[in-house]
Image (cartoon, coloured by chain):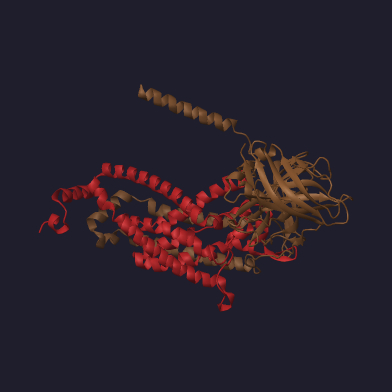
Chain colours: A brown, B red
Amino acid sequence: MKRLIARKTGLTALLAGLVMVLLAGDVMAHGERAQLASMRMRTVHWFDTKVEPLNVKVGDIVTVTGKLVTSEWWPKHMPSIEETVYLNIGVPGPTFLRLHSEVNGVPMMRSTAFPLGKVYEYKTVLRARIAGRYHVHPILNVKDAGSLVDKGTWLEVAEADDGAPFVNEITTLTGETINLETYGLDGVFTWHLIWIAMGVAYLLYWLIRKELFIPRFIRIRHLGSDRANELMTKKDFVVSSLFFTVSLALILGGYLWAEHKYPITIPLQTGLVEVEPIDIPTGGLEVEVDHATYDLAGRSLSMQLQLTNNSAGPLRIGEFLTANIRFLNPDVNEGEIYEGEEMVSKDGLTVSVDTIQPGQTVDVELVASDALWEQYRMTGLIHDPDSRFAGMIFYYDENGERFFQEVGGAVLPNFF
Amino acid sequence: MSEAQSTGLSDVEVKARQLDLKSLDNPRAMKLYRRFDGIIILVLFTFLVLGVQIQFTLTAGDWDYWIDWRDRRWWPLVAPFSLLLFIAPFTYGIWERVRLPIMATAVTTLLCLVSWLSRYLNFYEFTHFPLSFTFPSTYIGLGILLDCALAISRSLIVSTLIGGGLFGALVYPINWSFMAPYKVPVEFNGMLMSVADMMGYQYIRTTTPEYLRIIEESTLRTFGGSVTPLTAVFSALCGMVVYAAFLWVGYKINGLDKFTKRIV
């Protein structure tokens, strides 16, 4: 009876596992919701991210552009972006080739460092390599901290019209044009086959013999450790010497042959590159955060600010951005929404004062409210070891010119 | 003095050993032994292939996965260190018990075969990396040299000095025969890069940023910057030390058989 129950349980578990495997869907994200809420709010503010075009064929070019501001509220318990950072792109492996990347006009083949509180404009040029539907994210890999991911944009890559194998050609400084997809593989295969053949031949010599493990063990036990070497024959000595000589000759011969065939080689290159940061453009709005509360039930962040307009014209707050989520003020309606852009709350921002006149100092309440707080797991804010928030306020002058400024401070939860 | 008294074994044990020896002249017993030998090979090689794959992946994984990781300073140190610490204890056990100098060749050959299988299925078919960027290194020739040094000298000490030394010293030369093309220079955006660097840049690895590579990180350079030969000398020394240290580990593990006897 027990055996029958065990069998049934095992069969059920097997079927359940099979069903789970068969019903499993595609992975649709890259962990952008998984990171700690404060990490997303207080590290890097990505904006103006644009991926274009969104429908391409294998071999076509895709350009990813955007801007980012490094937060002055960077968590002190996390290694800083001021040390080492690398501009990367979040795609499923090499489904794209990276042809070019730059920050503030400086090519980004290597890592760099970003001081806090500055603006960086980035651009990455990709070439579609494998057909499919991909969620493309700009990423910053921060040394010892991890990856900071911008929001993703879906991109369709269709097969190329000719269906020919993908070719990735470059020209070396020695004047040779090579296809990196297959470059050097003839030599790799040849030498590996030679060595595998040598290894297998050596093992076969020792393993195909009349007396192997058990007989040899019995004989050594009988002979004792002092006389155990009597099991090694003269033939063993000769064959081993032969393998030793041939192996050494192949290693040295191969080395000299490669030196002759490729006389000009260089070591792997490394080092940091320097990027000149851009200052945040001053639009004349002075911002002081009085306090902020996060309403758990209402899924909204409420900020009490004191704003002073030091500019010559009226200013209006149009957008609040935090953790890649854009909360737009529908009354201002200036913020552009790009094709395929996600994480935008079109009417998520309420501002208690519509226009701030020149020279005026006003107390303003900003409420960023949307189900996106929940959807993107921002409610975890209250579980952070350092309960503070940060984000970007975007405001406009009377000509529609955009300015931005980072705000941040302590945040208290409202549980009821 | 009887044999039992001279060896410290019981009479029953001495008799059993004599019967074992006689069994080598018995065709039926030999047939049985050959079957057991086949099982031993199967079990041992399966364990070796799984063990070395996990061990090498954990200790030297990225150095072997990507061509743009194999620098002149760290890869020739890390790879033999990682392999010799796995090979040495097995070599001691197999040499002491059956006098077969095969473990280094077996481990390196099995590692090569399983690495190719992994690169083809995981890297090429599943994640679309070109094989030209992810092919494994080879250490088979070094394994043969190490085993042959033992077979020729019949001494673990001599094989440590010669075989262990060669194993460490020749990592770069044995792979240079097919790795040299990837160190040809390229100009890109006004900067000098090798073909390997270029591949590392173009073939995107989302969670393996450029700064993770450990490229020639060390102290100030002397001897005119002769990195490769200096690393080879240091690696040879490390090879000897690591091999000797882990032969001792093998010796200690081998000594645990007395507990097995007690259990039996």
Q: How many marks?
A: 0
Above or below, A263 relative to A156: below
Which picture quadrant has residue A298?
top right
Residue drawn 78% across the image and 39% down it? A346
Closer to us: A49 or A368: A368
Q: Position of residue B231 (x, y in %)?
A: 52, 70
Q: Is residue A127 left or right of residue B8?
A: right
Q: Is residue A370 left or right of residue A354?
A: left
Q: Position of residue A107 (x, y in %)?
A: 74, 61
Above or below, A25 relative to A84: above
Residue drawn 15% across the image and 51% down it? B10
Which picture quadrant has residue A344?
top right
Closer to us: B83 or A236: B83
Instruction: Point out the residue furthest to the bottom here.
Output: B223
The reply to whether residue A63 is in sight is: no
Q: Is residue B178 left or right of residue B79?
A: right
The reply to whether residue A385 is in sight is: yes
Closer to us: B30 or B97: B97
- The quadrant of the picture occupied by the C terminus of chain B is top left
Q: Position of residue A411 (x, y in %)?
A: 64, 47
Instruction: Point out the residue furthest to the top here.
Output: A1
Closer to us: A334 or A397: A397
Instruction: Point out the residue furthest to the right here.
Output: A399
Above or below, A27 relative to A406: above
Residue drawn 84% across the image and 55% down it? A359
Q: Position of residue B45 (x, y in %)?
A: 41, 48
- The quadrant of the picture occupied by the N terminus of chain B is bottom left
